[in-house]
Image: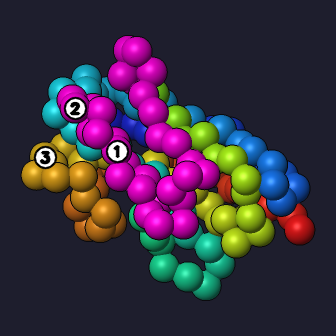
Amino acid sequence: QVQLVESGGGLVQAGGSLRLACAVSGRSFSYDVMGWFRQAPGKEREFVAAISTSSLSASYTASAKGRFTISLDNAKTTVYLQMNSLHPEDTAVYYCAIDFSPRKIATTRADYDYWGQGTQVTVSS
């Protein structure tokens, strides 16, 4: 059974950094896409970043470009999201997800097959 477990969330001041991690078990990465989404209170879950486990190509939402970096560990069992220059509007629950049959690096929630439980990120002003 595939399981995704996020960690690394917390409270940080504006301008600070956090590194989220998502450990995947029950699945050997082959040609998957791993993604990070976030959901703020009262808002829809939105795409943040994703990476292909085969090509290591990455995609970012506009607000994340230049501030966030998605990466994989060498064993390809953990995906990271390094978040720098955090803003209060980055406050949300962050979820990782996996797309088992990607045709591209998807940015739509419906394209992802399994999800983690989420980790809270709070950025104070």
Taking the image as drawn, is residue 115 in sight? no
Instruction: Give the SS element for disc 1.
Output: strand
Q: Residue at image x 75%, y 44%?
A: 17
State the image coordinates of residue 120 (x, y, percent, origin top left): 69, 56
Circle 2: residue type: Ser
Q: Earlier in the sequence, mark 3 or mark 1?
A: 1
What is the total number of numbered labels drawn onto the structure image? 3
Name the amino acid type tagged 3: Ser
Q: Nearer the viewer, residue 40 or 64?
A: 64
* C-alpha distance separating marks 3 and 1: 16 Å
Which sits in the foreground, 59 or 50?
59
Residue at 16% over, 52% down: 104
Residue behind mark 1: 58
Magenta-tinted stretch: 48-77
Mark 3 = which residue?
101
- Mark earlier in primary sequence (3, 2): 2
Q: On the rendered structure, is 98 left or right of 37? A: left
Horizontally, residue 53 falls left or right of residue 115, namely left
Is residue 78 in view from this perspective? yes
Q: Which residue is mark 2?
A: 55
Q: Secondary structure at mark 3?
A: loop
